[in-house]
Image (spheres, grey):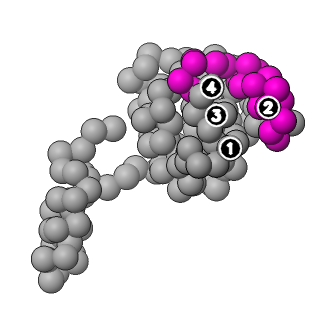
């Protein structure tokens, strides 16, 4: 999802505005939507089929359906990454997905994260990503 204002603009407005209600009202369209809405938006934007994404994610079908329905809160970072990889997200899109899920973004100073970043850049699928993690002696994404 693209916003009209960048984060710095919002910070300036927020610091200058003495009425939080006014700020919130004026910037309603600038706030993040819940994870399940973001996932649904990604499906539409990328013309993906939910059933195929679930299959490619290698995750439990019911678990992912609950995420998409908004009835599962606080998914694990690894499961969100598996869904993002199954959707074919690029690195920027993956970082946003992690933010929407209220999870830490991928950090290149973390070795495990570096492997995931490399897998995303190479457009690897979930199984290939797990193989890469195994090759370098890292914990698998899905066990």
Residue at mark 4 to residue at mark 1: CA–CA distance: 13 Å
* Pointer 4 local density, CA inside 10 Å: few below 14, some 14–19, many at least 20: many
Residue at mark 2 to residue at mark 3: CA–CA distance: 12 Å
Residue 7: percent from left, percent from top? 26, 56
Residue at mark 2 to residue at mark 1: CA–CA distance: 10 Å
Q: Which residues are magenta?
A: 120-139
Disc on the earlier residue, 2 or 1? 1
Magenta stretch containing residue 134, yes or no? yes
Residue at mark 1 to residue at mark 3: CA–CA distance: 9 Å
Residue 80: percent from left, percent from top? 63, 41
Residue at 44% x, 43% y: name it. 96
Instruction: Say which residue label 4 marks.
Output: 119
Mark 2 element type: loop
Q: Are marks 2 and 1 in contact (CB under 8 Å)?
A: yes
Instruction: Say which residue label 2 marks.
Output: 136
Instruction: Say which residue label 1 marks.
Output: 111
Residue at mark 4 to residue at mark 2: CA–CA distance: 12 Å
Q: Are marks 4 and 2 in contact (CB under 8 Å)?
A: no
Instruction: Say which residue label 3 marks.
Output: 116
Disc on the earlier residue, 4 or 2? 4
Q: Are marks 2 and 3 in contact (CB under 8 Å)?
A: no
Magenta stretch containing residue 77, yes or no? no
The answer to which image quadrant residue 123 occupies is top right
Disc on the earlier residue, 2 or 3? 3
Check the image and report above or below for 53 versus 36.
above
User: What secondary structure is the stretch in magenta mostly built from?
Assistant: helix
Residue 89: percent from left, percent from top? 50, 27
The answer to which image quadrant residue 68 occupies is top right
Check the image and report above or below for 14 versus 62.
below
Mark 4 element type: helix
């Amino acid at each position: 999802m693209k916003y009209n204002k960048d984060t710095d603009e919002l910070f300036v407005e927020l610091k200058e505005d003495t009425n939080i209600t006014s700020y919130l009202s004026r910037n309603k369209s600038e706030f993040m939507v819940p994870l399940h809405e973001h996932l649904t938006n990604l499906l539409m934007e990328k013309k993906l089929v939910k059933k195929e994404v679930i299959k490619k994610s290698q995750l439990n079908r019911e678990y992912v359906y609950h995420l998409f329905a908004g009835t599962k809160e606080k998914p694990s970072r690894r499961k969100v990454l598996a869904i993002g990889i199954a959707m074919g997200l690029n690195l920027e899109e993956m970082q946003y997905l992690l933010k929407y899920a209220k999870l830490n973004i991928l950090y290149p100073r973390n070795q495990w994260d570096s492997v995931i970043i490399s897998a995303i850049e190479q457009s690897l699928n979930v199984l290939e990503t797990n193989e890469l993690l195994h090759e370098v002696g890292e914990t698998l994404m899905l066990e």
